[in-house]
Image (tube, coloured by chain):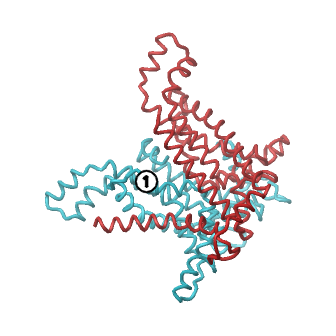
Chain colours: A cyan, B red
Amino acid sequence: MVVPALFMLVASFLQRGPHGTLVGPPTLANYLRFFGLTEAGFDPLYLLILARSVFFALVVTLITLLLGYPLAFAIAQSRHKEALLLLVVLPFWTNFLIRIYAWIVIFQKKGVVNAFLGMLGLDPLTLYPSWFAVYTATVYTYLPFLVLPVFTAVERVDWTLHEAAQDLGAGRFRSFLHAVWPQTLPGVVAGVLLVFIPALGTFVISDLLGAGRVILIGNVIQQQFGVVRDWAFGSAAAYVLMGLVLLGLWLYARRAGEEGLDRLV
Amino acid sequence: MRLLLRIHTLLVLLFLYLPIAVIVVLSFNQSRFGVQWRGFTTAWYEKLFNNPRIALYAENTLVVAVVSTLIATVLGTLLAVGLYRYRFRGKGLLRFLLYVPVVIPDIVMGVALLLFFAWVREATGFFRLSLFTIILGHVTFQLAYVALVVKSRLASLDPALEEAAADLGAGGFATFRYVTLPLIWPGVLAGALLAFSLSLDDFVITFFTAGPGSTTLPLYIFGSVKRGVTPEIHALSSILIAASMAGVLLGRALLRRR
């Protein structure tokens, strides 16, 4: 894994030759181009795509948290803990592409949603291709990644602290905020990373459900290695993405240690 | 509050199972286009089973999964034991690197492997994109998962057991074979199961490392989705859904027995 990564590092400093080969001399041009510094002047195209991807991943993470955090609590406190956990994880083990494809069937022009609206006598919506579809499918795909670590954290919560807070006169919300939420934080951080990072790098979901209208950093990389065949620029873009992720992971590892890293597996 | 939580759980579960239910129901629908229900049929399944290409793609997928899992399980276990037993320079870095394939977006790994294979191919003439390159690609990320699962099992091991074996005259290999390995076996098995299902499910790494003639089921599904899908894909997906669910349940039962 390290060797291909080093190869790519070299490639990111080369140039695109004829027929899409990589040729020297070494240059910084790919990175400069990514950050908008071209010979023709400042062009923030790729920076905007990067910013859009970060925003996209943030919103996905937030929605996942809103859906997944209460769910993890509900599971941890249920009598049917094992069964519920299995129910949440099972869809995750079915093939990723099938799940994405299912959302196309649901959202397309003559899809499930519009058939349903038609039965109610309502006008059909254009849900595919759209950002809405991409958001829905991404949240759907990564939800279990958040639920599992949060569930593990909730299981370990020391509820006597919660009772103590209430005995001392704190309301339900305040005692949750000060006695329970901090205890679940390690699980939340791990879950957030597990959702944010793949959401940041996705290209399949945006490709299939955005059908060319939704361009994220992952799509840029894929296009450079596919149709455009500019491997040097593609490598540079991949390195920018990887740099962001590794920086985040490294910061996390420094704070949370190896135990924290183990929560990501 | 409790009631609200229950409703929330129910809604999220509905959200999780809606797509799967849609696919399975449509696979029995007579209609070729759209989602209108036109009556029950198993015609798409028959068509699927009579399609020789599907059998080939399924075989490719399984060959990749089995071979890559075997390689990754052996290497991953040895890596974890090595990290557990020996001290050496760069160990901290190596440990951090183990987590990288787990979290790095798979597109980055995919394109890095694509570049690497292209380079080696140019230099030596080997590594034409084929099932072989897909297997190598899968091993690179499976390896990390196996090593991490085995590592967590090793962490719960009593070091006195290995020391006792050494005191009784067992060499490094004998200790590993008769003491360490039986103790970490459940971890090895769990790691292998995880690696196997990751390989079956993988699309991105396969996408970048596959060549002509090495189509796997996920690649075929992707192609069909891009071209506009036939109901055969619904049937194929339903079978895969059933198989993976059976696999998960079986795996759990196996692990619990131990």
Q: Say which residue appears at 46% left-offset and 45% top-offset.
A: A261
Query: Relative to the observer, which residue lies in front, A30 or A223?
Result: A223
When asked about the image quadrant of residue A41, the answer is bottom right
- Location of residue A186 in the rendering, given as x and y in whole percent from the top left corner: 38, 51
Mark 1 nearby-residue class (10 Å; few <14, some 14–19, many ≥20): some
Left or right relative to A255: residue A240: right
Asked if residue A44 shows in the view, the reply is: no
| B191 vs A138: above or below | above
When asked about the image quadrant of residue A204, the answer is bottom right
- Location of residue A86 in the rendering, given as x and y in whole percent from the top left corner: 46, 53
Left or right relative to B253: residue A21: right
Q: Say which residue appears at 67% left-offset and 57% top-offset.
A: A236
- Location of residue A58 in the rendering, given as x and y in whole percent from the top left corner: 49, 65
Report the number of discs: 1
Amino acid marked by disc 1: Leu
| B186 vs A20: above or below | above
Q: Which residue is mark 1?
A: A85
Q: What quarter of the picture does the N terminus of chain B occupy?
A: bottom left
Q: Say which residue appears at 78% left-offset and 61% top-offset.
A: A229
Question: Circle 1 sits in a helix, a strand or a loop, which is it?
Answer: helix
Q: Say which residue appears at 56% left-offset and 58% top-offset.
A: A198
